[in-house]
Amino acid sequence: MKSKKITNISMLIALSMIAGYFIHFPILPQAPFLLYDPGNVFLLIGSFKLGPKIGVLMCFITALLFALITGQGGPYGALMNFLATGTLIFVSAQIYLLNHTKRGAILGMILGALAMTLIMIPANLIITPFYLGVEREIVVKMIIPAIIPFNLLKGIISGFLTFILYKRLYPLIISK
């Protein structure tokens, strides 16, 4: 890997982590413990330029470093973060790679949000009981009113912010 590419990847990971650390807030009153952060925007921008595989690598490194540095979520939180963000990033970037247009980017982000939402249903059913130390029945009761809407909103908001900021941030973030 060339040094400029490594530098870009490192910068995007750092921006994602900074955004996630300093900007996070609940988006659903019924689940105030589910916090949105805009860190995915930098990973989406990077994955649109550098490809879906690099995007997933950035997600993995970000999730791991965020858990190690902040202690938030521990290994289960890092895994959940990676599954959600990795799915969003991979699907979005893969579709954009196949259809390198505005329409491809929008379609990719919509399908990425849907894929993330779908993957997080079984992930929450399997991992959350260990992660939060709650009975699976409690998680089942949260699927429709909280988990599905949260992941859809998370994907839509990240996609919208990426769409708005991509052209403005792209030249500043990704050097040639």
Image (tube, rainbow, N blue to C red):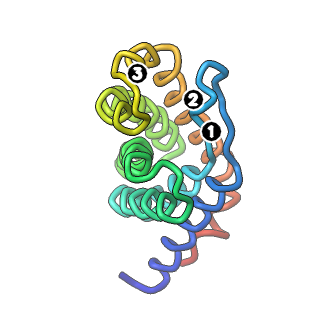
The percent position of residue 7, horizontal first and vertical second, equals 51, 79
Q: Quadrant of residue 136?
A: top left
How packed is label 2: few (under 14 Cα within 10 Å), some, or many (20 or more)?
some
Q: Amino acid at mark 2?
A: Leu
Q: Secondary structure at mark 1?
A: helix
Q: Amino acid at mark 1?
A: Phe
Q: Which mark is residue 18?
A: none
Foreground residue, 101 or 80?
80
Q: Amino acid at mark 3?
A: Val
Q: Secondary structure at mark 2?
A: helix
Foreground residue, 164 or 15?
15
The percent position of residue 92, horizontal first and vertical second, equals 42, 44
- Looking at the image, tell me whether mark 1 or mark 2 is earlier in sequence order: 2
The residue that disc 3 covers is 139
The residue that disc 2 covers is 153
- Look at 40% across and 21% down and name the residue there: 139
- Look at 43% across and 13% down and name the residue there: 141
> Taking 24 as reference, is 147 above or below it?
above
Q: Is residue 148 shown left or right of residue 162?
A: left
How packed is label 3: few (under 14 Cα within 10 Å), some, or many (20 or more)?
many
Q: Which mark is residue 160?
A: 1
Mark pair 3, 1: CA separation: 28 Å
Mark pair 1, 2: CA separation: 10 Å
> Taking 10 as reference, is 137 above or below it?
above
> Taking 160 as reference, is 59 above or below it?
below
Mark pair 3, 2: CA separation: 19 Å
Q: In the picture, which quadrant includes the N terminus?
A: bottom left
Foreground residue, 161 or 64?
64
Quick check: can you spot residue 173?
yes
Q: In the picture, which quadrant includes the C terminus?
A: bottom right
